[in-house]
Image (cartoon, coloured by chain):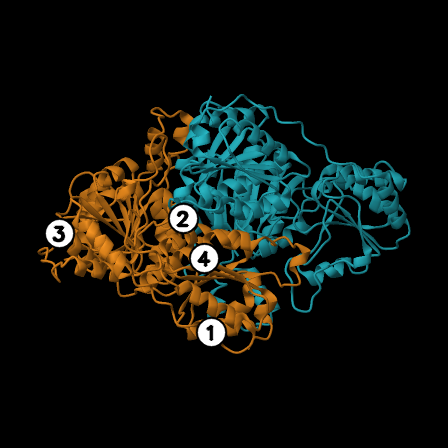
Chain colours: A cyan, B orange
């Protein structure tokens, strides 16, 4: 068994089922080994950012790592932006990068580069393999690292000669470490502080945005009269149905600071201390009063258990009163706007859908409309590296073939990984893309204003406008094999969206906003 | 004058005229300053790899650096692959990367990352700015670094607060360092060695592939009965017309080694020692006999002067006999193949065209057909990081608005930076793309065979096939605003290509190979 096969066999035995691949010459033995280990399904992306974003979406939905298979430094570099998002989401991912044969590196052939330097900023674990015989062990350690709570990005660089060289036997992946349990002392300290506070906030992130986490958090909030917020960009947020209503912490720092400013205590449950997304002149980085922040659990600790312990410590009733039946918002009519688009999506959302939100400014209205929509899972842009939505939807659809995936997507952001549509067509994935075409980097137009540039000159204006020429998203989708239609009014969307969601397979609705 | 304006004003005063931009919030002051320094033209790309590849093409054609303006670590990372190519091409490029405000970095906001670690592998010079007042000085040093022979990639990371903070006065860029002159001793040593050799090869690269360099090299070759080769992936190669015939060193190592194997001396003029593109089991990395290699000039030395000195030292006649009139190959007929496509392009090539070759396996036949085509400039994939062709053509067309640019382009590679077509449409660039659609990663099918996998299984096969679904390149081009037509026979190409080349503006011919 060569090194490549021992690596893949070890990964398959550990339960790895997916490999999002865009390989090149230095990965050929691993490519060939995929046919000897058919339990690992290979899915081709036409661009590395599609592969890494899909691995992120897959990992968020399954809790298990997919492999990516990428080509040397420059190929890997194309996947960095979405690995940045995956790392911020704490998604388990294992990257395999082929490198030159170990004896060939010294010759500095054209594709040689410092892969470790490129990989380190987006990897919690990096290793360059040193022999064929250790490849099985290397991948076992990579998988274990990826599964370390709360989930990590692991990167294994595999010189080609170790892939084709004779490997050793298989290696069992050591059992996953469990998330740590928050100490009673911490729980009691936070409970005391909550009891003593008039205005409490619980800021939920990570695993606290699961069903159990939110139900426990709502019991705590009810017991102390506090408010619930979700971090601004959750990796995975269970929402709708009879789940407690949790508001999203606003994006802009003035609004974020306003939401938290009068809190006597801000309990962090799975969330990090909230800070401004960007630093602005004259605005503090911190959003919450510094002395109000109280950390319930550290990143490697279990926020759900901590919230349940906290509810118990506060003698909160074991179940919360139901919130009543779901009331769908009405279907919108009239002009097609971000508001009516968000309303239509909330009104039509099928039970158990997965919504991937990279709609940027066009997506904001959806949150309020969908608070009482049917149960759904929301995946968002954790790291702010745009081009995440379409690949993440692709990976989520592969992870959950029995669930409808909706990619709620901004046009500017979609361009960075537009090739995702092809993988959706190739794999017949059940993804409906709502492409919000406002033909601008709308957020940057807002940011220019925030930076005091009320009347941008022609060059600044031109760098935020995508209307010359307008992208024809229906043509692009068809070019990748995805059926598409253009929608110009809210009424047309109200008519088309239920039909689109009822049909299986990928399709794209181009919303002219 | 704020820091951003002092930076751009300094760059403009140093002759910088272009900024290929895909900015975000942390670059807003620089974006605004572009309207205060209109001598620097801003060109928008929808993806960072378009910007960096365009800066590479622009720099290769002008010898001067363009700016790129990119957003933080993940945005920059999307531009790494083409910066890898630019660095290997020795193209002068100055990257400007906005970063968080210096006081905001400590809060590890979502988009925070280690930009220096990402930038270092593709930059010859990296600096993080430390104050607004030094920004003019920083960019002056970056430009000087970019212009250091033989050309370098310089990266300046600019925290947002230094962009909006009060800058100091402008700074003059120190005059460019000239390339070093090769010593008489070295020239005489090589001349002696050439006189004593029966079988000599001159391997030309970098500046030696200019008109003067090749004419001098041909005089040397004539004087000693030697052969001329160009390195396999030249940054810029002047060809055709009455220039000497120079063969391209073959890509595959067996053929490269065969071309050089019997040489008694291999003189490196602007080229590095030739090595295999990849390491293969049982094949040495070096292509030339080790004791045959003789270095005429180091990277920072002038290969043209060195070759002219060498010709003089060998008493070569001052001018070489003409090679006769150009004879265009006949227009092809019958089946559309890589051969007939290369023949058609050579037959129709307009005088003074710029050909950007990223046609991969489909492009090989063009080299022989075009040896005696009208004078043209050829730009190739220096670093092997695919996705270079369409952006490089974009930048070359901006650099040389009076020359026809032909992008001879493989389909798989084109997908990595397909968004280039939009910038071509937006800027009305005179680029004709010959999109070679063989619906496969053909090179990987060959590489699987080379790796001993004669009959790939379904997964390996699937990772090299792009036919399910077939990309509709005409739809994609139209989606980006570029007119397109599908070509299915050599006769249709022979009819369509002259018309396409005669029309100004971007267009795409999808060649179904």
* Residue toward you, A152 or A412: A152
Task: Measuring from the top left, give residue B69's x and y in whole percent.
Answer: 48, 62
Which one is earlier in the sequence, the residue at label 4 or at label 3?
4
Q: Where does residue A91 sit, x and y in percent of width and height?
A: 62, 40
* Residue at numbered disc 1: B10
Name the residue beneath numbered marker 4.
B124
> Would residue A302 appear left or right of B185 to someone viewing this image?
right
N-term-proximal mark, 1 vs 3: 1
What mark, if any, has residue B53 been given in the picture? none
Q: Residues within 10 Å of mark 2 (few under 14, many from 20)?
A: many
Question: Residues at marks 4 and 3, common chain?
Answer: yes
The count of marks equals: 4
Chain label for disc 2: A
Identify the mark at residue A475; answer none if there is no mark.
2
Whole-number angstrom distance, CA of label 2 to CA of label 3: 38 Å
| Mark 3 residue crowding within 10 angstroms, few (<14) / some (14–19) / many (20+) | some
Residue A233 visible in the picture: yes
For marks 4 and 1 on the same chain, the one whose residue lies earlier in the sequence: 1
Q: Position of residue B332 (x, y in %)?
A: 15, 44
* Residue in the picture at 50% in, 30% down: A131
Tag nearer the camera, 2 or 3: 3
Instruction: Using the image, name the chain to which the residue with label 4 belongs.
Output: B
Q: How far separated are the C-alphas under marks 1 and 2?
A: 43 Å
């Amino acid at each position: 068994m060569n090194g490549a096969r021992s690596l893949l066999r070890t990964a398959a035995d550990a339960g790895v089922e997916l490999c999002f691949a865009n390989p090149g010459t230095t990965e050929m033995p691993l490519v060939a080994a995929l046919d000897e280990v058919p339990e690992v399904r290979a899915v081709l992306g036409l661009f590395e950012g599609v592969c890494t974003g899909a691995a992120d979406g897959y990992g968020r939905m399954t809790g298990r790592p997919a492999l990516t298979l990428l080509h040397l430094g420059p190929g890997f570099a194309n996947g960095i932006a979405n690995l940045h998002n995956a790392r911020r989401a704490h998604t388990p991912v294992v990257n395999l990068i082929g490198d030159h044969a170990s004896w060939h590196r010294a010759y500095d052939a054209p594709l040689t580069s410092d892969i470790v330097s490129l990989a380190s900023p987006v990897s919690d674990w990096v290793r360059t393999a040193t022999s064929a015989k250790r490849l099985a062990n290397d991948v076992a350690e990579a998988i274990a690292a990826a599964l370390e709570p709360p989930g990590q990005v692991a990167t294994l660089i595999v010189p080609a000669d170790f892939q084709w060289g004779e490997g050793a036997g298989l290696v069992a992946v050591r059992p996953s470490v469990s998330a740590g349990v928050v100490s009673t002392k911490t729980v009691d300290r936070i409970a005391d502080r909550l009891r003593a506070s008039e205005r409490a906030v619980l800021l939920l992130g990570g695993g606290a945005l699961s069903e159990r986490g939110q139900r426990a958090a709502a019991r705590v909030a009810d017991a102390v009269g506090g408010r619930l917020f979700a971090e601004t960009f959750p990796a995975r947020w269970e929402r709708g149905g009879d789940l407690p209503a949790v508001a999203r912490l606003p994006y802009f720092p003035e609004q974020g600071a306003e939401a938290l400013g009068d809190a006597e205590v801000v309990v962090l449950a799975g969330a990090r201390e909230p800070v401004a997304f960007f630093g602005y002149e004259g605005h503090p980085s911190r959003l919450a009063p510094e002395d109000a922040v109280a950390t319930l659990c550290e990143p490697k600790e279990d926020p759900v258990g901590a919230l349940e312990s906290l509810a118990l410590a506060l003698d909160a009733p074991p179940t919360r009163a139901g919130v009543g039946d779901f009331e769908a918002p009405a279907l919108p009519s009239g002009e097609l706007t971000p508001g009516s688009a968000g309303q239509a999506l909330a009104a039509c959302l099928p039970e158990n859908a997965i919504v991937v939100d990279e709609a940027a400014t066009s997506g904001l209205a959806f949150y309020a409309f969908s608070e009482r929509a049917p149960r759904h899972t929301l995946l968002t842009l954790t790291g702010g590296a745009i081009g995440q939505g379409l690949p993440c939807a692709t990976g989520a659809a592969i992870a959950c073939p029995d669930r409808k995936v909706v990619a709620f997507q901004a046009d500017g952001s979609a361009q960075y990984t537009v090739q995702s549509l092809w993988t959706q067509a190739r794999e017949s994935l059940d993804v409906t893309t709502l492409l919000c075409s406002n033909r601008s980097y709308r957020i940057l137009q807002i940011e220019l204003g925030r930076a005091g540039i009320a009347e941008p000159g022609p060059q600044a204006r031109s760098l935020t406008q995508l209307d010359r020429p307008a992208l024809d998203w229906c043509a692009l989708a068809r070019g990748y094999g995805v059926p598409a239609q253009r929608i110009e009014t809210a009424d047309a969307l109200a008519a088309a969206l239920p039909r689109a969601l009822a049909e299986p397979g990928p399709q794209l609705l181009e919303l002219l906003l």
